[in-house]
Structures are given as structure tokens and as C-alpha cells.
Image (tube, rainbow, N blue to C red):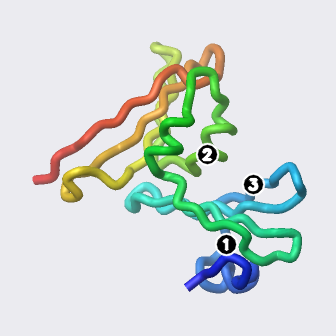
Amino acid sequence: EMKTGVTTQAEVRSRMGEPGFVHWNDDGTATWEYARQPSGTNCYMITFGSNQVISKIEQVLNDANFGKVHEGMSKDDIRRLLGAPGTKQLFDNMREEIWEWRIEGMPPMDETYFIVQFDTGHGGVKKTSKRVQPKG
């Protein structure tokens, strides 16, 4: 329904509602975040040009973006890359905060999650992993 170079901010807002978050880009344009967590497996980032028309639509919960996550990245960096997580858990005794996104998995009937662990002492990414929770 939405097309780059055609669909306006007003049309996106009318079809999808208010964005969960607005990321401001270095060039002054905006990227709107539409996370479908915790039940969905997608997060759409819709970037608008200075003319308030879509310049890019991206489903960011994908292997290419998971591969960009590296040790030391900040929570803000991760939020910008992957959108809002489905869950956040804080483990004070282990000095960790864990963010988890439900993602498309194999086989599709199982629930698959991408996990980012942060070191709360340093604040940056400690490690990532995936887990599969079989259904049934």
C-alpha cells in the first residue's frame, strides 16, 4: 500500500497510527518506528525525505541487521537499528540487562527470539544470541 516517493507522512499516520518512536537523522529528516512487538515479528522503519514523502521502508528485524550488532554498542544504537524490544529484563546480580525481540523463525510454527545482553556496568552490548521456543 505504501510506496517510496509517493506516500506522505499524513497518509502513513492515517494508515498505521502514530509511530512508536521518531528517530531524527543527521540530515534533519525523520524515521518513524513501528514495532510489532511483543506478539508480532516485524519492526518497520519508515524514513521520510525533507518533502515529507517516504524515501525508504525497511523491515529491520532481519539477519543482516542482527549481524551489525557488536560488543560495546549502546542501547540507543540498538534501538535505532532494531526498534523497541518485545521484552526487557534487568538482572542486577549479574550486571546485565537483556532485550528480546520475537522474530521470524524456522520452522515458522516455533517462536524464535533474537537476544541482546547489555553489561549494566559499562552500558554496552555484551553479547547476542537466538533462542527457539517450540510450540505445543
Residue 68 at x, y percent in the picture: 56, 36
Which of discs 2 and 3 lies nearer the camera? The answer is 2
Name the residue located 61 percent from the left edge and 39 percent from the top edge.
78
Disc 1, SS: loop
Residue 81 at x, y percent in the picture: 61, 45
Position of residue 39 in the picture relative to residue 15 (left or right): left
Name the residue located 19 percent from the left edge and 53 percent from the top edge.
107
Residue highlighted by disc 3? 23
Q: CA distance from mark 2 to mark 3?
A: 10 Å
Q: Quadrant of the N terminus?
A: bottom right
Dot 3 or dot 1, earlier in sequence = 1
Task: Say few, some or many: other residues with alpha carbon within 10 Å of mark 3 (under 14 / 14 to 19 / 20 or more).
Answer: some
Which of discs 2 and 1 lies nearer the camera? The answer is 2
Disc 2, SS: helix
Amino acid under disc 3:
His
Q: Nearer the viewer, residue 36 or 93?
A: 36
Q: Quadrant of residue 132?
A: top left
Dot 2 or dot 3, earlier in sequence = 3
Task: Say few, some or many: other residues with alpha carbon within 10 Å of mark 1 (under 14 / 14 to 19 / 20 or more).
Answer: few
Name the residue located 23 percent from the left edge and 50 percent from the top edge.
106
Q: Residue furthest left?
A: 136
Q: CA distance from mark 2 to mark 1?
A: 19 Å
Q: CA distance from mark 3 to mark 1?
A: 13 Å
Amino acid under disc 2:
Leu
Identify the disc placed on residue 18: 1
Name the residue located 56 percent from the left edge and 19 percent from the top edge.
119
Amino acid under disc 1:
Glu
Instruction: Look at the numbered discs 2 and 1 and tell me whether their residues touch, using CB distance below 8 Å.
Output: no
Examine the rendered structure and indicate whether residue 109 appears above or below residue 98.
below
Residue highlighted by disc 2? 81
Disc 3, SS: strand
Task: Say few, some or many: other residues with alpha carbon within 10 Å of mark 2 (under 14 / 14 to 19 / 20 or more).
Answer: some
